[in-house]
Image: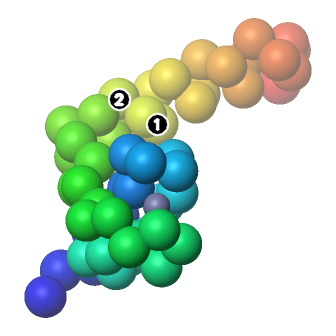
Amino acid sequence: MTKEILKCSNCDLYTLKAVCSKCGEKTLSTKPAKFSPLDKQGKFRRIYKKKYKGL
Ligand SMILES: [Zn+2]
């Protein structure tokens, strides 16, 4: 079983369980394409650069 992050759309709760521990609603997997490591790193780097100019 993979440890993918699941989300309860009912109470916006992130969990690793297939069922929300809060309301018992079936959780949905978040879209992995959104968390591309390359893109995330590039984006973070750009934000970092912007935040700390001259570093
Ligand atoms: Zn819930």
Query: Seen in the image, is 13 located left or right of residue 39?
Result: right
Q: Is residue 31 visible?
A: yes
User: Do labels 2 and 1 touch, CB within 8 Å?
Assistant: yes
Residue placed most toward the observer, 20 or 4: 20
Considering every residue shown, the one lying at the far left of the view is 1
Residue 50 image point, x, y percent: 75, 11
Residue placed most toward the observer, 25 or 53: 25
- Please, is residue 17 above or below residue 32 in the view? below
> At 83% from the left edge and 17% from the top edge, which residue is drawn?
51
Residue 12 image point, x, y percent: 51, 47
Considering every residue shown, the one lying at the far front of the view is 23
Q: Residues within 10 Å of mark 2 (few under 14, many from 20)?
A: few
Query: Seen in the image, is 34 located left or right of residue 12?
Result: left
Name the image quarter holding the N terminus. bottom left
- Please, is residue 3 above or below residue 29 in the view? below
Q: Amino acid at mark 2?
A: Asp
Q: What element does badge 1 sit on?
A: helix
> At 46% from the left edge and 36% from the top edge, which residue is drawn?
41
The residue at label 1 has a CB less than 8 Å from ligand 1: no
Q: Amino acid at mark 1?
A: Gln
Q: Residues within 10 Å of mark 1 (few under 14, many from 20)?
A: few
Mark 1 lies on residue: 41
Q: CA distance from mark 2 to mark 1?
A: 5 Å
Name the image quarter holding the C terminus. top right
Q: What element does badge 2 sit on?
A: helix
Mark 2 lies on residue: 39
Q: How many numbered marks are there? A: 2
Residue placed most toward the observer, 14 or 48: 14
When asked about the image quadrant of residue 27, the answer is bottom left
When asked about the image quadrant of residue 39, the answer is top left
Residue 17 image point, x, y percent: 34, 80
